[in-house]
Image (tube, helix red, strand yellow):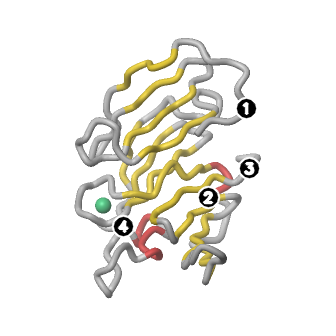
Amino acid sequence: MSATPEYSYATWATVFVALHAACAITGYTGGSFADATLLNTGSAWTTRDIVTVADISGDGIADMLYRTTDSGRLILRKGKANSAGTGVDIMSLANSAAGAGGADTEYAASGWTGTDVPRFFAVPDVNSDSVPDLYAHMSDGSVRLYYGGKTTIGSYTTVIGTWTGKLAFG
Ligand SMILES: [Ca+2]
């Protein structure tokens, strides 16, 4: 279970938060948010972190990438367009069955437990392939840049060999 909320910006106006449950906080106007939507109930999110909410699949609709802190997997939940055609239907990210394709898919099979990767953050795109990439601060102190793929995570480059004593990252 995460000690602090994990969050991700789907757009400037929307923030996704996970702390025991996933929540979307929407309608930020610069001073306040208009609404908060609880995406699910139950215990599933006690062992999950949101990695990012961004278009990974390449269809222009935001997807949710999350990790399972106990099994160390990265999981992709593809979003569906909203009825207005202006972005993602937030509730399509609420659970596996609601997402595009009706099921989550495995983005990385192992190696992403909270012990393996204590800190990480996703960035829009480092290598100009239009897929978000991911910086990971590994348990050995190294920092890796993982290149995202549209269906599975790609290869990585170690960008810092030893980076210890850090409490925050991002
Ligand atoms: Ca997508």
Q: Quadrant of residue 93?
A: bottom left
Give the Cα separation between the discs numbered 4 and 3: 25 Å
| Residue drawn at point x = 32 percent, y = 79 percent | 86
Instruction: Give me the disc on residue 4.
Output: 3
| Residue drawn at point x = 54 percent, y = 36 percent | 72
Asked whether, in this view, residue 73 is left or right of residue 116, the answer is left
Which badge, 4 or 2, comes first in the chain's sequence? 2
Comparing labels 4 and 2, the label whose residue is closer to the camera: 4
Asked whether, in this view, residue 29 is left or right of residue 126, the answer is right
Tag count in the figure? 4
Comparing labels 2 and 3, the label whose residue is closer to the camera: 3
Per the image, label 3 sits on a secondary structure element best described as loop
User: Where residue 128 sits: x, y (%)?
Assistant: 25, 41
Which badge, 4 or 3, comes first in the chain's sequence? 3
Mark 1, residue position: 167
Query: In the picture shown, does residue 27 fall above or below 59?
Result: below
Give the Cα separation between the discs numbered 4 and 1: 32 Å
Which badge, 2 or 3, comes first in the chain's sequence? 3
> Foreground residue, 63 or 69?
63
| Residue drawn at point x = 44 percent, y = 64 percent | 96
The disc labelled 4 sits on which kind of residue? Gly
Per the image, label 4 sits on a secondary structure element best described as loop
The disc labelled 1 sits on which kind of residue? Leu
Quarter placement of the C terminus: top right
Give the Cα separation between the discs numbered 2 and 3: 16 Å
How many C-alpha atoms fall within 10 Å of the one at disc 2: few (<14), some, or many (≥20)? few
Q: Within the displayed image, which quadrant is ligand 1 positioned in?
A: bottom left
Mark 4, residue position: 79
Which badge, 4 or 1, comes first in the chain's sequence? 4
Mark 2, residue position: 44
